[in-house]
Amino acid sequence: MDPYLSDWLTILLRWLHVVAGIAWIGASFYFIYLDLSLRPPKRREDRQAGVSGEFWAVHGGGFYHSQKYRVAPATLPYPLHWFKWEAYTTWLSGFALFVVLYYANADGFLVDPAVADIGEAAAIAASIGLLALAWVVYDVLCRVLAGREVLLGLAVALFTVAAAYASAQLFSGRAAFIQVGAMLGTMMAGNVFFNIIPAHRELVRAKEEGREPDPTPGIRAKERSVHNNYLTLPVVFAMISNHFPLAYGHARNWLVLLVLMAIGAWVRHFFNLRHQGKTRWSILATAGIALVVLAVVLRPDDGASADGDTEPVAFADVERVIEARCLACHSVDPTDVSSAPGGVTFDTPEEIEAHVDAIRRQAVDSRAMPPGNVTGMTDEERELLGAWIRQGADVSPR
């Protein structure tokens, strides 16, 4: 794909994806908060009409009064507002972005020969297959373990572990994180499309036909909605993880991803309990401790000191490595992209010196760059860059 066209598609799709995601996640957070904050109605007329709970709020200069019916009101109201396109737009724009960034550039972002030399077509097929598999496995688990939420939660967690491990064995580190996030996002969108919206349609259809609505589909839909709520923070982290090479560039990146996702779900649990009037500060405390421990574990090892390097590294050797492995993207006139990512260029010694810390993080410590190791940077070249940095990153000729 033309790099300039790819950049524009990325901008527009990412913008749409983020906005739609905000709308979907915001609705999920709000309605779970609303549902958990409902109080028994005070008016007898409301109770007799089938209202199970009510909620008063003040916002935007006015008061709002929300009521939830045990099943449905006596008369079908009009207009009736649905919440579905936020979810559909988020998934569709996210998949389109996945195609533009990872499938159209599979050799640079999806495939890493050092992880699995499976070829672009095989990697794309595996990615799409895993997305479909995620929904099928999750939906089967929900049906088989219906009513046993703890066991279901454990089963979904174990499947997520398997998905993270498998993705880390098939794709580049960056792509593996996005793949797992996309699998969970597919489960969430599938809940809306295959369960939640059909349950709503059944309630509406029953009222239109004059039948007494069956509450069971609505109960099942609510369970799936709660699942989506707990998956939001893990998915959001996966979707922004391409900015964090210290996580996806780690040798055991799949474990790093799982820990961060678990922390996100745990924090979400704190807020869901708090909405019910149950404040458990221990949840936030343990989440914070887990983050600190993870940060300590992920701290890059500075490696041997400069004294431990047997020979001084000449800057000319460093320049040759950067020219061969980095300038395809990080140049004022790149060949593989339309413009240098982040505006970072390595055309002059001064520019290289200014970005020494980024070179250490991205190419030496995390091995996140080049993306998918598309330019074939060797271990020896990474070691040479590391030794040069430890020796002071001198850019003067020797």
Image (spheres, rainbow, N blue to C red):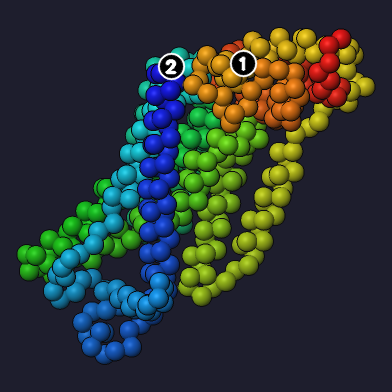
Q: Amino acid at mark 2?
A: Glu
Sequence-wise, the earlier of marks 1 and 2 is 2
Give the image location of residue 284, x and y in percent. Answer: 63, 61
Q: Is residue 132 above or below residue 149?
A: above
**CB contact under 8 Å: marks 1 and 2:** no
Q: Amino acid at mark 1?
A: Leu
Report the residue at 33% width, 61% height from top.
222
Q: How many marks?
A: 2
Q: Residues within 10 Å of mark 1 (few under 14, many from 20)?
A: many
Residue extending furthest bottom? 44
Q: Is residue 387 above or below residue 154?
A: above
Q: Which quarter of the rendering shows the C terminus?
A: top right
Residue 124 figure quarter: top left
Spatial separation of the CA atoms under disc 1 and disc 2: 23 Å
Report the residue at 27% width, 79% height from top.
51
Q: Secondary structure at mark 1?
A: loop
Q: Secondary structure at mark 2?
A: helix
Report the residue at 60% width, 19% height from top.
331
Residue 309 appears in the rendering? yes
Q: Which residue is mark 1?
A: 327
Give the image location of residue 330, x and y in percent. Answer: 60, 21
Residue 116 appears in the rendering? no
Residue extending furthest left? 209
Q: Which quarter of the rendering shows the N terminus?
A: top left
Q: Residues within 10 Å of mark 2 (few under 14, many from 20)?
A: some
Mark 1 or 2, closer to the camera: 1
Q: Is residue 358 above or below residue 271?
A: above
Q: Which residue is mark 2?
A: 120
Report the residue at 56% width, 27% height from top.
341
Circle number at residue 136: none
User: Which residue is more in the foreground, 131 or 322?
Assistant: 322
